Each structure stands twice: as structure tokens, then as C-alpha cells.
Amino acid sequence: NLVETHHVHKLDAPSGTAITLAEQIVDNLDRKERWGLHETKEGVLRIDDIRRKEVPGIHTITYDSPEDMITITHDAHGRKGFALGAVIAAEYTAQHNGLLTMEDLFQF
């Protein structure tokens, strides 16, 4: 499952980052067919959204099985990283043409 936590002023749920992460998981995990907000059906990657105080952004992905559990969390301590990312993306787009994606920027 995937849990995303943001400040109470955030209007979209799930966040764009959560959707991007969920789509990448669904594309690469055979037992998941799609993602769904608060859904618990078989084959659906559940996304839960939490809005709490002034949290800049926390995204947690959990892979769970009867044998073990793996949890990966990104916890933004502030908004500086988001601002820097926007500047880097703007500089990149100024030097490249066409439809660009995050994969282009990071060259995955």
C-alpha cells in the first residue's frame, strides 16, 4: 500500500507524487492491476491520504507478505527541496525541446 501525508491546505488527494508512484508500482508488479484511493479490493494498490497540520510531504510505500514487510518512506522536512527541483526542471526545459517527463530530467 501507499500512504501520503500532506498539510491541511493541500486540495488534491491523492497527490500527484502518490499517483506517479502508484502507477509505477502497478506497471511493475504483476499482482496489482490498478490503484485506488482507500480501496481494499484484490489486485488494487491502496492509496491512503492523510492531511495533518503543516506537513510538507511524506510518502510511504509498504510491501507486505506473510514472511516480512519492507517499508520505504520519503519525509520532506520543508519546501526548499521542492523549490530547488522546480528550478532544476525549469533550467532543463529551457535547454530541451518537445514533451518532457521526469524520466528525461533524471535520465532513468
Image (tube, rainbow, N blue to C red):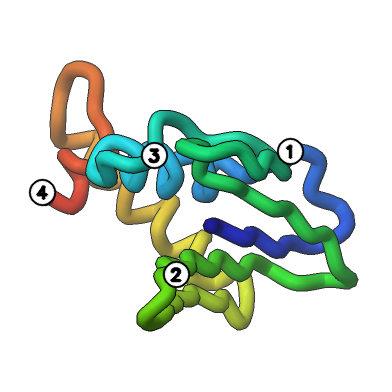
Q: Residue at x 64, y 59 (%)?
A: 4
Q: Do the residues labelled 3 and 4 touch (CB within 8 Å)?
A: no
**Residue 48 in picture, x, y percent from top left:** 69, 53
- N-term mark: 1 or 3: 1
Q: Are marks 1 and 3 in contact (CB under 8 Å)?
A: no
Disc 1/disc 3 C-alpha distance (Å): 23 Å
Q: Nearer the viewer, residue 48 or 43?
A: 43
| Residue 32: assigned label | 3
Identify whether 94 is placed above or below 51: above
Disc 4/disc 2 C-alpha distance (Å): 30 Å
Say which residue label 4 marks: 107
Q: Nearer the viewer, residue 78 or 93?
A: 78
- N-term mark: 4 or 1: 1
Q: What residue type is labelled 4?
A: Gln
The crowd level at tag 4 (other Cα within 10 Å; few <14, some 14-19, many 20+) is few
**Residue 14 in picture, x, y percent from top left:** 66, 42
Q: What element carries label 4?
A: loop
Q: In this view, does 73 lie to the left or right of 12?
A: left
Say which residue label 1 marks: 12
Front of the two marks 1 and 3: 3
The crowd level at tag 1 (other Cα within 10 Å; few <14, some 14-19, many 20+) is few
| Residue 72: assigned label | none
Q: Residue at x 52, y 39 (%)?
A: 42
Identify whether 9 is placed above or below 30: below
Q: What residue type is labelled 2?
A: Asp
Q: Which residue is drawn at 83% across and 60% down?
A: 51
Q: Is mark 1 on a helix, strand or loop?
A: loop
Q: Residue at x 39, y 53 (%)?
A: 87
